[in-house]
Amino acid sequence: MAISTLPAKRAKRTGKTGSSVYLKTVMAVTGIIFVLYVLAHMYGNLKLFAGHAAYNEYAEGLRTLGTPELPRHGFLTIMEIVLGVSVVLHIYAAVTLWKRSKAARPQRYAVKKTVVQSFSSKWMRWGGLALLLFIIWHLIEFTFFKVNVGPGGQSASVTQDPFELVVHTFNTWWMTLIYLVAMAALLMHLHHGVWSASQTLGLASTPAARRYWKLAGLAIGLIVAVGFIVPPLFILFGVIK
């Protein structure tokens, strides 16, 4: 390990809500919200195997969940607000912590990291950016504008039918490929994210607990990624149609 004698640049002192511990806690809590959401979303996607009517009934059930106490789409609106705020907080905390880490360890104050540490930190940063771009496209495609791409890359008419929209999308090989790459990124992000959250929340204080949470992160990542990947592949190969 090579350390120069040049002093590191001091980070600014911040209040309690700006401390690194607080920001890491924000990332951990918002990360838990994301894990719960993707598990629920994965379950919904698996409804595609139940057929056209069952999937559309599930989609309609989400829109009317909580009625008449809530207006139509009320539950989804609340969920979208919670997720939107969580995304903003998660990104803000991640960027702030990255800037502080960079300021505390400038190039001239070089501490050699292991290959694993270096890859892990870089992956979380760039993999997170890739996921953000995918989420934006996913919302444009399925929520805001309902972009319906037909087989062979030819534009199809826009449909309001949830099942048809999904099937038409993943009948196109390059759309499925983009989705598969995004799910691989999600797997790795969840794997590292669950492990990091367990450390932040004090759940990995012993060697046995650390091993458990590493395995838990891998298991959650694999379950979510495989659960999301299977329906598009079955659509692409004509099993779901």
Image: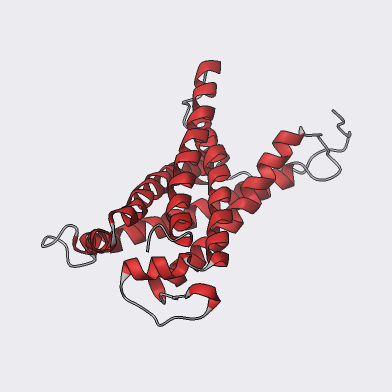
Colour scheme of the picture: secondary structure
Expressed as whole percent of the image width and height from the top left, the position of residue 150 reads 47, 75
Expressed as whole percent of the image width and height from the top left, the position of residue 157 reads 40, 83
The residue lying at 24 percent from left, 58 percent from top is 54
Choose between 25 and 206: the one closer to the eye: 206
Q: Is residue 115 left or right of residue 85?
A: right
- The C terminus - image quarter: bottom left
Tally of marks: 0
Expressed as whole percent of the image width and height from the top left, the position of residue 76 reads 28, 61
Choose between 25 and 221: the one closer to the eye: 221
Q: Is residue 229 left or right of residue 7?
A: left
Expressed as whole percent of the image width and height from the top left, the position of residue 233 reads 48, 55
Residue 166 position by quadrant: bottom left
Residue 104 position by quadrant: top right
- In this view, 82 is above or below 145: above
- In this view, 238 is above or below 143: above
Is residue 62 among what the camera can see?
yes
